[in-house]
Image (spheres, helix red, strand yellow):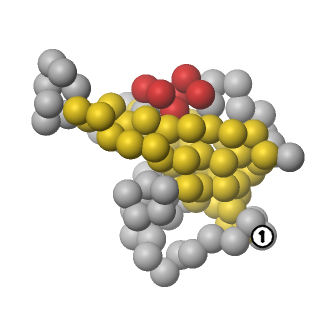
Amino acid sequence: MDYNFEKKEKEQISDDLPAVVHDFNEDKILQGYFKRMQKNVGENQSNAYVFEVSDGVEVGVWGTTQLDRLLKDAKEGQAYEIEFVESIPLKSKPENTFKKFKVSLLK
């Protein structure tokens, strides 16, 4: 799986996680092999997921409520495609959005 690093901003999530974090606003789809998940990362105590995207190169993905649910049974070494579908404003707080994703297991 190839990955374009030219547009990716380096953001160190944690010492044990990759410096490159996938930006779904720039690139709607990520394909990679699931490596691991780390809980309680960063100031929001979020889950962070690590995917191998090409020849051992790892990319981080911040968890969201939906991604946490969709990836809860992810197995190390399985190939996944994560597609960002849309942001939906919350009725209770329109300034906040629900990020909708589709996760597929690749063969």
Q: Residues within 10 Å of mark 1 (few under 14, many from 20)?
A: few
Residue 86 in the image: x percent, y percent?
A: 38, 43
Instruction: Say which of 99 and 69 sits in front.
Output: 99
Residue at 75% from the left image edge and 39% from the top image edge? 105
Residue at the top extreme?
92
Q: Position of residue 99 (x, y in %)?
A: 38, 37
106 left or right of 83 in image: right
| Above or below for 40 versus 104 | above
Count of picture labels? 1
What residue is pinned by disc 1? 55
Residue situated furthest right in the rendering: 107
Residue 54 placement (x, y as % from top left): 73, 68
User: Against 93, is 3 above or below?
Assistant: below
Would you identify the image quadrant in which residue 96 lies?
A: top left
Q: Quadrant of the N terminus?
A: bottom right
What residue sits 79% from the left and 46% below the top? 106
Instruction: Look at label 1 and name its amino acid.
Output: Asp
Q: Secondary structure at mark 1?
A: loop
User: Would residue 33 be found to the left or right of residue 98 on screen?
Assistant: right
Task: Answer left or right for 65 relative to 43.
Answer: right
Point 56% across, 55% down: residue: 29
Left or right: where 24 falls relative to 53 = left
Farthest bottom residue in view: 6
Report which quarter residue 76 is drawn in. Answer: top right
Residue 34 visible from this viewpoint = no
Q: Position of residue 32 (x, y in %)?
A: 70, 54
The residue under the point 49% across, 56% down is 28
Q: Is residue 54 visible?
A: yes
